[in-house]
Amino acid sequence: MKLVGRTREHELIHSMLGAGRHVLLEGPVGVGKTTLAMTVAKEYSRNVIRVDGDGRFTEQKLVGSFDPKLVLERGFTRESFIPGPLYLAMEEGAILLINELNRMPEMVQNVLLPALDDGKIQIPVLGELDAKKGFALIATQNPREFVATSPLSEALLDRLEWISISHLTETEENEIVKLNLSTSQGAISSWIEKAVVLTRLTREHPKVKRGASVRAAIALVQVLSGQKNPTDESFWNIAKSVLANRIELQVGKFSNQPYGHLLDELLTELKPMVEARLKKKP
């Protein structure tokens, strides 16, 4: 996938990795943190080992553990040890990409400290593992106020260079939507512009706590492109389905109505705003 925008962030990550530092990318869902991290990692021609953050992730899954059956056969040897992603990245001198690091439990996060500090970790029985040259961590995280996240400790943050990743410009988001359409999806540019304007307005509306990312615009146009003769009515019907799981409403602040009714109210308010914004476009 072509990387759109992000020139400043791209250069920053390269500078930090070139200096032997480790990187933390923070930004809302859907702004391309993982795509940016993967793009930069692949440019180094190193193996990239990806881990997705999960509250059920354990220290053993990150570092590795002994296989009981193999231990019975061979004892506590390297052959009976099943390496985890951190072990493999250090052993190979690879880039470890941890997506949504702050969704991992704090004890799992802390396992990273000696690896980032000294390039070493201790493995029970096997002893010390030294990271090969080239080992680096690129981590991403959603904003710290997000639900189901564990704030990173000061000790861990002190070992990571922070880069903020925000939403792209409207022009760049239009380009991203176009790039995500297959050749068989002949969506005209007016639908793309309308979808992007709509998703961007959800980020500004007072009834929306968390607005939609460009992913919503991509989904909207992809579904709309599957229709033979898309209409404005079908656009808004699809928009409701697409936005439902991609925005967070200020529900308690405004109404006790069912979620579907709240969405209808929001879309009713957004329709004239979208049209007005489109009319202002040159």
Image: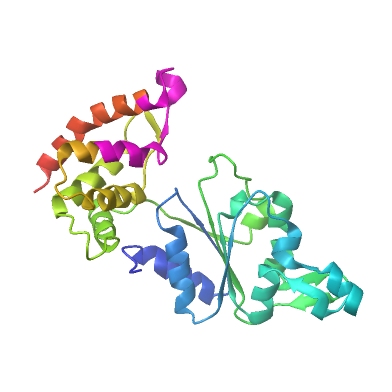
Magenta range is 237-260
Along the line of sight, which residue is nearer the eye, 15 or 229?
229
Image position of 237 with respect to 99: above or below: above
Q: Residue furthest top?
A: 256
- Is 76 displayed left or right of 21 in the figure? right
Q: Is residue 75 visible?
A: no
Residue at horizontal 63 percent and vertical 80 percent from the top: 93
Residue at horizontal 53 percent and vertical 80 percent from the top: 46
Colouring convention used in this rendered image of the protein: rainbow
- Is 113 displayed left or right of 4 in the figure? right
Residue 239 lies in the magenta-colored region: yes
**Where's the N terminus, which quadrant?**
bottom left
Residue 282 lies in the magenta-colored region: no
Q: Position of residue 279 (x, y in %)?
A: 10, 40
Q: Position of residue 219 (x, y in %)?
A: 32, 50
Q: Position of residue 160 (x, y in %)?
A: 59, 61
Q: Is residue 164 visible?
A: yes
Q: Residue furthest front?
A: 228
Image position of 83 with respect to 226: above or below: below
> Quarter-wise, where is residue 171 in the image?
bottom left
> Quarter-wise, where is residue 112 in the image?
bottom right
Q: How many marks?
A: 0
Image position of 279 with respect to 17: above or below: above
Q: Position of residue 8 (x, y in %)?
A: 37, 64
Residue at horizontal 66 percent and vertical 69 percent from the top: 85
